Image: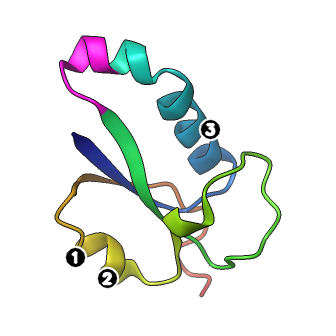
Amino acid sequence: MIGIGLLGYGTVGQGLYKIVSERRDQLSYILSDEMEVLRVLVRDLDKKRDVEIDKDKLTLDFERILDDSNISIIVEVTGDLEKG
């Protein structure tokens, strides 16, 4: 299993999540392994999003992504690094 941690869930993050989810079989064939977004860092857990995601995957805590031994790839797709 190739676990992905996303930093950000705006337009690009949601697009990446959608591609990984919808093309799971194709990606598994190409990579000879399954790929899944396991955790996503967001600023607001309750924000309405265009691409639905299991709320259990969302976190406000970056350390939850860093400390998750199942995550082997971290993808940063935040729009504004200066904004807190």
The image quadrant that residue 47 belongs to is bottom right
Q: Which residue is disc 3 drawn over?
A: 15
Between disc 3 and disc 1, the foreground one is 1
Q: Does the magenta stretch include residue 31?
A: yes
Numbered label attached to residue 63 = 2
**Magenta residues (range):** 28-34
* Tag 1 near tag 2, CB within 8 Å: yes
* Residue 20, above or below 64: above
Q: In this view, does 51 lie to the left or right of 6?
A: right
| Mark 3 in CB contact with mark 1 (< 8 angstroms) | no
Kindly identify the amino acid type of the residue bearing the numbered disc 1: Asp
Numbered mark located on residue 67 in the image: 1
Q: Which amino acid does label 3 sit on?
A: Gly
Q: Distance between the residues labelled 2 and 3?
A: 23 Å
Q: Which of 9 and 69 is in front in this view?
A: 69
Instruction: Decide whether residue 13 is among the magenta residues.
Output: no
Give coordinates of residue 48: x percent, y percent. Answer: 83, 63
Query: Which image quarter: residue 54?
Result: bottom right
In this view of the protein, which residue sits in the foreground, 26 or 81?
A: 26
Q: Position of residue 14 (x, y in %)?
A: 63, 46
Q: What residue is rendered at 71% in x and 49% in y?
A: 52
- The mark nearer the N terminus, 2 or 3, is 3
Q: Which of marks 3 and 1 is nearer the N terminus?
A: 3
Task: Using the numbered discs, state the Cα–Cα distance from disc 1 to disc 2 in whole angstroms.
Answer: 6 Å
